Amino acid sequence: MTATETRSIADVAAAAGIPAHTGTSIDGPVGTAASLHLACALPAVTWGSELFGPLLMRAEHLATPLRYEGGELHLPDGPGFGVELDPDAVRAFARS
């Protein structure tokens, strides 16, 4: 589902006064950060989300890992999605 489709569904839920919940497939940290930003931007999303993909990964991809604390994923606040890839990790995962 695209962000536009998600937004449309959330707008219908908001108009009807129905709380919404978001989730993803098991995304990496960049996809998770993007999904979190979308969820935080949608007023209907009041039941949280399931964005735990990075917790299941054996290797870190970001210069500063996403912050999970107290059962919550905290919204990164840098430019873009608020995350920065770790260049060494990118090289380690690159295929030639």
Image: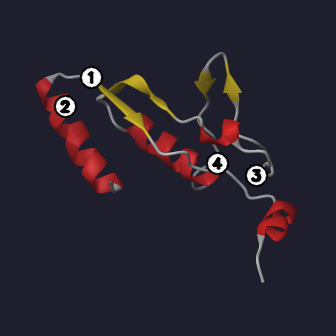
Instruction: Please tell me whether residue 7 is drawn above or below residue 46 in the rendered image.
Output: below
- Answer few, some or many: residues within 10 Å of disc 1's Cα (few below 14, many 20 plus, some between 14 and 19): some
The quadrant of the image that shows the N terminus is bottom left
Which residue is tagged 3? 62
* Residue drawn at the location 39% of the way across and 39% of the way down: 41
Label 4 close to label 3 by CB (< 8 Å): yes
Residue most toward the top? 70
- Residue 48 percent coordinates (x, y): 44, 25
In the image, what residue type sits under mark 4? Answer: Pro
Mark 4 or mark 3: whose residue is earlier in sequence: 4
Which residue is tagged 4? 29
- Of residue 26 and residue 75, the one placed in the foreground of this image is 26
Give left or right: position of 30 versus 41: right
- Residue 68 percent coordinates (x, y): 68, 28
- Residue 38 percent coordinates (x, y): 42, 44
Instruction: Please tell me whether residue 93 is drawn above or below residue 58 in the rendered image.
Output: below
Which residue is tagged 1? 19
Mark 1 or mark 3: whose residue is earlier in sequence: 1
Give left or right: position of 75 versus 48: right
Q: Which mark is residue 13?
A: 2
Q: Secondary structure at mark 4?
A: helix
Give left or right: position of 63 versus 42: right
- Of residue 39 and residue 55, the one placed in the foreground of this image is 55
Mark 3 or mark 2: whose residue is earlier in sequence: 2
- Answer few, some or many: residues within 10 Å of disc 4's Cα (few below 14, many 20 plus, some between 14 and 19): many
